[in-house]
Amino acid sequence: MEFNDLNGITSLYNEYKHYITVHKDIQQLKQKVVEIIVAKQFIPMMNDLKWIKLQHAVSSLAFEPPYVLRCITDKDKTCHTCLNEVPNWLGDWSNYYHEGMPPLFMIEWLKVRPQLSQHRGRLIADAIIDETTAFRAILERLRIPYDEEDNIFTIYGYKQAKHTILENTCHPAC
């Protein structure tokens, strides 16, 4: 990683930490998220710095890839299908204080399709810009764990433990 990239990431990280700490509501939200993580036995897969490195690296792509996400605090279990087709919209990879992603500690998972459909007219097929290979290279370079299926990358902020402590404990009758 070049020195300028490191300075940019450090600057973004410091800016993010500043906004997270000065907003009282964000601190209360963070406490609520911690309570949910403990109650549901989530295991953290990412941290703020990894998310910020990813946000910074995505800016090097030809476009900001579309994404959908689920927050730890979301109550519905809706499965998002809007990425099943190549999207014609962009993702906003900026932070919440710039009207982008929610606070990073809230992200349970992020599904990204690094392809963009551009309309060229009624009589000609849309152009597809494909940044799949470049996006995969970013994830691998930053050592970000992901699942990939049908050109959709799932990046987990948290994963639920497969076995709870209670399930692994032997019953007294054993």
Image (spheres, rainbow, N blue to C red):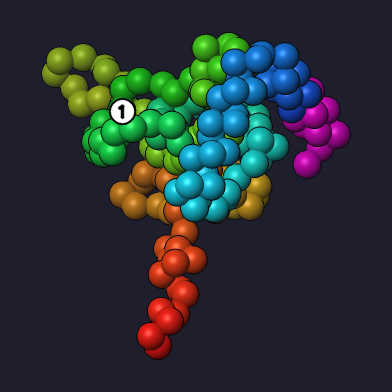
Tell me: 107 left or right of 85: right
Q: Mark 1 points at which residue?
A: 87
Which residue appears at 20% of the width and 26% of the height? 125
Q: What stretch is highlighted in magenta?
A: 1-11
Quarter of the image where the N terminus is located? top right
Instruction: Return the x and y of residue 137 as percentages of the image width and height.
Output: 57, 48
Which residue appears at 33% of the width and 32% of the height? 75
Instruction: Identify the element where label 1 is drawn.
Output: loop
* Rendered position, 5 above or below 18: below
* Rendered position, 38 above or below 16: below
Which residue appears at 26% of the width and 35% of the height? 78
Which class describes the residues within 10 Å of circle 1: few (<14), some (14-19), or many (20+)? Answer: some
Q: Which of 19 and 61 is in front in this view?
A: 19
Q: Which of 23 and 168 is in front in this view?
A: 168
* Rendered position, 92 above or below 81: above
> Which residue ends up furthest to the front in the rendered image?
172
Q: Nearer the viewer, residue 1 or 79?
A: 79
> Which residue ends up furthest to the right in the rendered image?
3
Q: Quadrant of residue 109?
A: top left
